[in-house]
Image: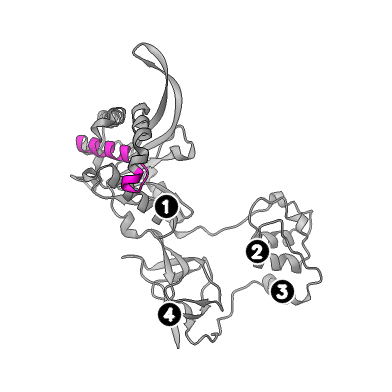
């Protein structure tokens, strides 16, 4: 019995997706509900699972664009193979494959990272392992083909180039970011926060917090609470422009920027103003894990009234975060560094963090943006009120 594997719909208005990665290869035996591929749209990444157990035949290449509902693979449940369509390999690849059986010298390539296909191509063309050792990355077929094509000059493995197709998610993200710069009057204002009290509370209660709630007590929950209180105090920051109208929210759906292999994703913590610190930490941990493992859905990222971006986890000291449309503001958190500051007329060393608020000046005045940051500063420097 033959089972057709079709592309599911990731969500409304999406008609085309990209097969970003096959997790199996033609001829493999797959189990029912086993994940066999990663599918990427311009909004999210999802996985494709086998509907039945059997031998799979892949019909569509990785990185290829396909219509929603189209057949991308077939599973033969009795274990027999299905003939696959002719591949769109180039003449160079066909020649390399036809010469595989005539390989005179076998290389093991034990000291480098190399894909099976790249290894086969390298062996056929007698490329020595020593020529590839200085390249500090995993070698793919394209890297080896680049070496083969450079026959007119000596090969320098330190100057290899890799060409990779822009993913649908990255392409859409690029379009949105350019649109933000062109369609908003974006400004950024800064302030700094003394993190002493929050760090002391975190140090004192982190073990008990982890034991009781099953998640670590981080800084993000404190900032999320501070943001929700500040948004309720400065509603313009929690609004956006729709045509010739301003839409205000009486709730706080906070987007938390998460860096993944697929790019930047912003899952939403909904009604964060009603959550305590533990509930916020649990929600963020769940969403971040879904983002990193490719399990995040479009619903997880739809909506949001305000975004928090934490560049400090990468060591950023100061930055100007870019708006997440249609939102009108975004908070940037940064690295915590000990610096000398004046405290009651004396110089003391304190753990300080710069914070930044980028905002759309069409809807948010300077007074509100500065007041919003000062309110966050006061909340973090007096965390007892948040608890």
Horizontal arrangement in the rendering, residue 382 relative to residue 287 (left or right): left
Q: Are marks 4 and 2 in contact (CB under 8 Å)?
A: no
Q: Are marks 3 and 1 in contact (CB under 8 Å)?
A: no
Q: Quadrant of the C terminus?
A: top left
Return the residue at label 4. 52
Return the residue at label 3. 95
Return the residue at label 2. 141
Q: Are marks 1 and 2 in contact (CB under 8 Å)?
A: no
Dot 4 falls on a residue whose secondary structure is loop
Horizontal arrangement in the rendering, residue 71 relative to residue 164 (left or right): left
Q: Which residue corresponds to the image point at 37% horizontal and 40% vertical from the top-left?
A: 207
Horizontal arrangement in the rendering, residue 175 relative to residue 115 (left or right): left
Q: CA distance from mark 4 to mark 2?
A: 32 Å
Q: Is residue 268 visible?
A: yes
Return the residue at label 1. 173
Return the disc, 1 or 2, that comes first in the chain's sequence.
2
């Amino acid at each position: 019995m033959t089972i057709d594997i079709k592309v599911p719909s990731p969500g409304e208005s999406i008609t085309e997706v990209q097969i970003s990665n096959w997790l199996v290869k033609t001829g493999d035996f797959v189990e029912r509900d086993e994940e066999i591929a990663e599918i990427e749209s311009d909004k999210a990444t999802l996985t494709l699972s086998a509907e039945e157990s059997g031998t799979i035949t892949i019909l569509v290449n990785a990185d290829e664009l396909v219509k929603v509902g189209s057949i991308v693979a077939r599973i033969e449940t009795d274990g027999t193979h299905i003939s696959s369509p002719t591949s769109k390999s180039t003449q160079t690849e066909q020649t390399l494959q036809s010469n595989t059986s005539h390989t005179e010298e076998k290389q093991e390539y034990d000291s480098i990272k190399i894909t099976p296909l790249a290894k086969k191509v390298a062996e056929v063309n007698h490329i020595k392992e020593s020529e590839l050792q200085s390249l500090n990355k995993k070698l793919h077929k394209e890297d080896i083909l680049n070496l083969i094509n450079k026959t007119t000059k000596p090969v320098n493995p330190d100057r290899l180039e890799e060409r990779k197709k822009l993913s649908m998610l990255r392409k859409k993200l690029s379009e949105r970011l350019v649109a933000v710069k062109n369609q908003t009057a974006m400004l950024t204002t800064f302030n700094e926060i003394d993190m002493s009290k929050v760090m002391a509370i975190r140090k004192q209660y982190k073990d008990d917090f982890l034991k009781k709630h099953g998640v670590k007590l981080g800084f993000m929950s404190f900032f999320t609470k501070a943001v929700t209180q500040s948004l309720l105090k400065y509603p313009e920051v929690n609004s956006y422009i729709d045509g010739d109208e301003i839409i205000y929210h009486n709730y706080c759906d906070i987007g938390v920027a998460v860096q993944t292999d697929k790019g930047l994703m912003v899952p939403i913590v909904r009604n964060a103003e009603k959550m305590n610190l533990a509930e916020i930490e649990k929600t963020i941990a769940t969403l971040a894990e879904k983002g990193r493992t490719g399990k995040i859905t479009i619903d997880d990222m739809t909506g949001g009234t305000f975004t928090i971006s934490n560049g400090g986890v990468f060591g950023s000291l100061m930055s100007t975060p870019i708006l997440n449309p249609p939102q009108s503001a975004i908070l940037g958190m940064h690295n915590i560094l000990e610096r000398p500051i004046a405290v009651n007329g004396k110089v003391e060393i304190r753990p300080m963090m710069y914070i930044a608020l980028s905002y759309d000046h069409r809807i948010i005045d300077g007074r509100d943006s500065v007041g919003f940051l000062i309110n966050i500063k006061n909340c973090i420097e007096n965390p007892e009120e948040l608890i």
